[in-house]
Image: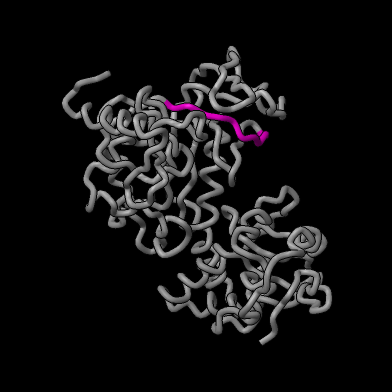
């Protein structure tokens, strides 16, 4: 078994020629589904055709609606040069049911996602490439296989839900079971947590004006992906922050606020009709892409890696979300808004003071910040609110 030490070794291995075809994640998974569920011999042969030479500079194929998207060899090599320091890649020959190396063994899952989003990827008809890879396939079977592949990205609905309906989509029984074993959805630490802690999603469900959940559902109403959507009350930046282009997108009255114990100032302002789409939990890469497209089309901010994207610019703004000042018995793990100011009822994606709760517990708890007295006050405030003693 050969082990690749560096991506520069690709030149020595000559693993890609101008006509050698490889598949990306979603296409491989869909072909395996068709092969296994329908006992489809042509899906099996297409999987085994990876690495085959055809008279077209078309490689790294991926599903893209009713077509395949693809990259050219030159573009792939340019992309791979960025990965030169990546660690070893084992299992050179991939799945033993594929007699050619799988693209998974060359490019890490996350890097496939970025490669798929490269602006210079082309599009080609599915039938044209499939016929080149397995020329013996009859026209009738080709049409059936193409229709099966096209159906991967059709027949779904995206919608916003709020209130008690949010908790419903954190139950595994409401997920698309056929896809559930893929992607990040199945690894979410909050899945089925309400069975153990019934109040864990209260900060979502009891703030319908602030928190919604964007869901993608299949034709049977089963979940394929989800992302929290927050209404932003204020946006801020530190006085030393650059990237004026990002912040010029917001029509706010910026005010300087001195925040102890920090030396620089926080500049922030009230927002209106500004929404933020949090981390996407999905089953397949194309679903994540669909969520990001939805956010762009609806002019929402969205989480991209550790940054926040808005109107084509990426920065690290400080975002504030107002929630009802009620007693929360448990808290979900927060991907972005881990800092809860108990006194003001404000969530923030950065720690702007040393008070309140940190909501980074994957088991539904929280940790206290501040001095001993401040910790006692914050904890007591949250507890006493159960008796509607607001202060």
Instruction: Tell whether position 26 is magenta.
Output: no
- In terms of depth relative to the viewer, which is nearer, 191 or 124? 191
Task: Please identify the quarter of the rendering in which residue 310 is found.
Answer: top right
Q: Tag count in the figure?
A: 0
* Residue 51 shown left or right of residue 358 in the figure: right
Dividing the picture into quadrants, the one containing residue 371 is: top left
Residue 175 pos. (x, y %):
34, 55
Q: Residue furthest bottom?
A: 1
> As displayed, is residue 107 above or below residue 387?
below
The residue sitting at 42% across, 39% down in the picture is 228
- Residue at the image point whose x is 60% and y is 58% from the top: 110
- The foreground one among 243 and 229 is 243
Q: Quadrant of the C terminus?
A: top left
Residue numbers of the magenta segment:
312-321
Q: How is the image coloured?
A: one colour
Residue 203, located in which quarter of the rendered image? Answer: top left
In-front residue for pair 77/379: 379
Residue 61 locus on image (x, y percent): 65, 63
Is residue 122 visible in the rendered structure shown here?
A: yes
Asked if one can make out residue 209 in the rendered structure from this viewpoint, the answer is no
Q: Residue 118 at what x, y percent from top left?
A: 71, 51
Quadrant into which the N terminus falls = bottom right
> Does the segment drawn in magenta span residue 315?
yes
Q: Position of residue 246 (x, y in %)?
A: 67, 28
- State whether residue 76 is above or below residue 203: below
Residue at 80 percent of width and 63 percent of height:
77
User: Most extreme residue toward the left, as rendered?
Assistant: 387
- Classified by dominant secondary structure, the portion drawn in magenta counts as strand
Q: Residue at 63% of width from left, 65% of height from top? A: 108
Asked if residue 212 is positioned above or below residue 125 in the image, the reply reads above
């Amino acid at each position: 078994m050969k082990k690749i030490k560096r991506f520069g070794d690709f030149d020595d291995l000559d693993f890609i020629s101008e006509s050698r075809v490889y598949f990306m994640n979603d296409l491989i998974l869909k072909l395996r589904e068709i092969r296994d569920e329908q006992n489809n011999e042509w899906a099996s042969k297409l999987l085994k055709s990876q690495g085959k030479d055809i008279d077209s500079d078309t490689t790294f194929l991926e599903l893209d609606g009713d077509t395949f998207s693809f990259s050219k060899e030159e573009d792939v090599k340019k992309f791979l040069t960025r990965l030169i320091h990546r660690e070893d890649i084992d299992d050179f020959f991939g799945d033993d049911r594929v007699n050619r190396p799988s693209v998974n063994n060359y490019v890490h899952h996350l890097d496939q996602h970025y490669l798929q989003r490269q602006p210079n990827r082309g599009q080609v008809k599915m039938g044209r490439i499939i016929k080149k890879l397995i020329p013996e396939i009859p026209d009738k079977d080709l049409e059936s296989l193409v229709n099966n592949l096209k159906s991967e990205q059709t027949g779904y609905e995206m919608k916003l839900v709020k209130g008690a309906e949010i908790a419903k989509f954190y139950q595994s029984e409401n997920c698309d079971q056929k896809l559930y074993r893929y992607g990040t959805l199945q690894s979410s630490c909050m899945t089925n947590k309400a069975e153990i802690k019934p109040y864990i999603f209260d900060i979502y469900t009891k703030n319908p004006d602030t928190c919604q959940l964007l869901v993608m559902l299949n034709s049977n109403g089963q979940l394929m992906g989800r992302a929290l959507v927050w209404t932003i009350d204020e946006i801020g930046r530190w006085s030393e922050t650059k990237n004026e282009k990002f912040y010029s997108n917001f029509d706010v009255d910026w005010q300087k606020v001195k925040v102890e114990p920090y030396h620089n100032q926080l500049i922030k302002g009230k927002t209106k009709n500004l929404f933020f789409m949090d981390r996407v939990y999905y089953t397949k890469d194309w679903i994540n892409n669909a969520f990001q497209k939805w956010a762009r089309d609806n002019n929402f901010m969205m989480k991209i890696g550790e940054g926040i994207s808005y109107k084509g610019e990426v920065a690290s703004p400080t975002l504030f979300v107002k929630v009802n000042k009620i007693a929360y018995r448990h808290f979900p793990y927060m991907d972005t808004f881990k800092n809860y100011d108990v006194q003001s009822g404000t969530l923030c994606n950065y720690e702007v003071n040393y008070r309140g709760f940190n909501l980074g517990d994957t088991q539904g708890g929280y940790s206290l910040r501040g001095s001993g007295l401040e910790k006692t006050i914050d904890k007591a405030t949250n507890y006493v609110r159960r008796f509607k003693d607001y202060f």
